Amino acid sequence: MSQLTATRKVAIVGAGAVGSTIAYACQIHAVASTIALYDIDFAKVNAQVLDLRHGSMFAPPVTIVGSDRVAVCADADVVVITAGARQRPGQSRMALAGRNVALCHELVPRLLEVAPEAILLPVTNPVDVITTAVLEASGLPAHRVIGSGTVLDSSRLRALISERAGVGVPSVRAYIAGEHGDSAVPLWSGAYIGSVPVSDWVAGGVRVFTDQVRGDIARAVTAAAYEVIAGKGATNYAIGLAMAHLLEVILRDQRLILPVSSLVEDFHGITGTCMSLPRLVGRAGAGAVEPVVPAPEEIEQLRCSAAQITKACRDLRL
Ligand code: 6V0
């Protein structure tokens, strides 16, 4: 474990499918020296902690603690928020907004009392609305509230492009931006396989990523969570890995460009909305938006996506 890791604590609120899998991914990757789980359900949080600790012989030395008391989050460097209702099969993320916003209003001041220096990382859905609520309830500067945003969606997009092209995922660079939800926007104009724009990629002299194929991929990304939830009730593995990666980027100040949800100011006419755009992320939190110039139709889609998030927030008086 590096010296940096040795001094870091990650607290995870909600020890359900998502929170416990984030903890597991963090344990395996030694993202922090201490992983704390907080859940109102004592039996569940206790069981998750025991189960994680029982694997310690096969994992890096990480301290894992858990409680139904918020004090277990004390002095965390980052607090990940996964508490709240999740989608039922066929239900949209936006349907969860009212309940989960109320939960955040109650939770966030208590978290900041015990972890006043923490970066807050909301994962609970609808994550862009929840990021807005956490920003409001915390009174923190915008860079310290980082929604998981479309980090997971972008990973799904890259996996699908990689499969079609027959090229490993690390050689694919592509982002989903906007809402983590039904109005998500694939930024095809900035998508590359190696140094070739995705739309120019050929196999056997034929363009692979036609309008039809790109449309199919975009629909598959949007439908992905519905498909997984229909089959097993929750999504957990990919979000677990995605958040362990994001936490590593923050705690080790890796300064990577990631599509996290954060307050957008003055981006092609979008202002005052929390949504995902590729941004610099490091120990200081969410940094500047990449100076990307999306295609005109993508800008239009991003404006529509922002409008949907803003409307959902207004409906909840955020
Ligand atoms: P889950 O398995 O029901 O776990 C939620 C946990 O929260 C339960 O253990 C509850 O006891 C706990 N909880 C509820 N209220 C509180 C509270 N006030 N304080 C502490 N703990 C509390 O749900 P799951 O883990 O599957 O999903 C959690 C949230 O993550 C949902 O809103 C999902 O929609 C969302 N996801 C977000 C993703 C993203 O990419 N942003 C991806 C997957 C799921």
Image (cartoon, rainbow, N blue to C red):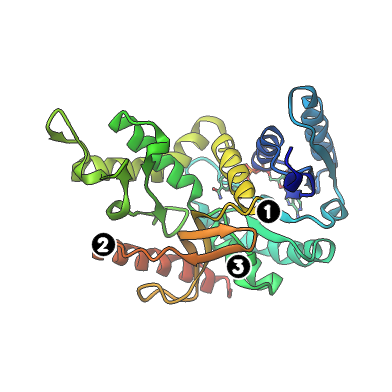
In the image, 271: left or right of 53? left
Say what amino acid the circle numbered 3 marks. His
Say what amino acid the circle numbered 2 marks. Ala
Reading the image, the residue beneath label 1 is 81
First-in-chain label (3 vs 1): 1
The residue drawn where x is 81% and y is 38% is: 64
Of the numbered discs in the image, which one, if any, rests on residue 295?
Answer: 2
First-in-chain label (3 vs 2): 3
In the image, 120: left or right of 65? left
Image quarter hosting the N terminus: top right
Q: Label 3, secondary structure: give it.
A: helix
CB of mark 1 within 8 Å of CB of mark 2?
Answer: no
CA distance separating discs 1 and 2: 34 Å
Reading the image, the residue beneath label 3 is 143
Occupied quadrant, residue 218: top left
Q: Nearer the viewer, mark 3 or mark 1?
A: 3
Give the crowd class for mark 1: few <14, some 14-19, many >=20 residues within 10 Å. Answer: many
